[in-house]
Amino acid sequence: MRWGPTTPPSRRGVSGVALSRDGKLGLTGDLNGVARTWDVATGKEQSHFCHIRWENPVGLEPFDPVVVEPVALVPGGRYALSADGAGSLCQWDITRGKLVASFRCNSSFLCSIGVSSDGKLAVTGDSKGRIILWDLQAGSELRRFQADKTYVLSVRLSQDSRRILSGGVDGTVRLWDAKIGSELYCFRGHTDSVHSVCFSPDGRLALSGSWDKTLKLWRLPR
């Protein structure tokens, strides 16, 4: 099935996708600064949410800050998350079509979003090398820690929300303690940037994908 945005039209391409656990709802982010939800069965757009166009602040990387790239669906089917080039993480109520909360990340591009299995927490990786853990119910930041000197390209929370997995420009895959922000282990083996990471459901394995054209499966320490 081929999907195409309807209103307003996206002229610059799709930059992020997510799919609900039941496979019925799709979510996209595009380079026009719009997040959209889709009915997977019909391919029709259900709703769209527009990010505010910010003036490019001093110190921000030279790209259009309204770009919406990472997106995520919160388990339960009611909320969606989207992030833009100005460092805003937005939480949307899909059922009401309204903005619930907006988090600012101090002029950094958000590269990745991960959501906990219970829908209470979110984790982001940004262009300043930071990992930030968010309380979605309280609408506040829980903690942040420096994971790298530059882009953290992918982040994920474990099933029990106790650990965070990250991939970066330096080609490493890192395992973190989500409660205190300490690094538990660093996996080396990729020869280029790691753009995608994920946990196995039981939390014992991690999978990473890199621009070096390889996938690597890692056994995680207990």
Image: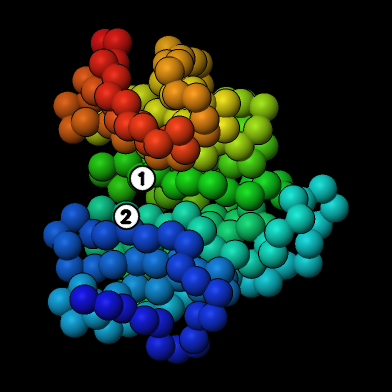
Helix, strand or loop for disc 2: loop
**How far from the left and from the top, in percent, is residue 153?**
51, 40
Q: Is residue 80 left or right of residue 153?
A: left
Whether residue 218 is situated above or below residue 63 in the rendered picture: above
**How far from the left and from the top, in percent, is residue 201?**
18, 33
- Rate crowding at label 2 as few (under 14), some (14 to 19) or many (20 or more) other CA atoms within 10 Å: many
Quadrant for the C terminus, please.
top left
Q: Is residue 214 left or right of residue 141?
A: left
Specify the label residue 174 is tagged with. none
Q: Amino acid at mark 1?
A: Val
Query: In this figure, which residue is indicated by the disc labeled 2?
Result: 74
Specify the label residue 115 is tagged with. 1
Q: Residue at the far right: name it.
A: 58
Q: Amino acid at mark 2?
A: Val
The residue nearer to you, when weighing 45 against 89, is 45
Q: Residue at x 17, y 68 (%)?
A: 24
- Rate crowding at label 1 as few (under 14), some (14 to 19) or many (20 or more) other CA atoms within 10 Å: many
Q: Are marks 1 and 2 in contact (CB under 8 Å)?
A: yes
The residue nearer to you, when weighing 220 against 171, is 171
Q: Residue at x 26, y 16 (%)?
A: 219
Whether residue 208 is situated above or below residue 76 in the rendered picture: above
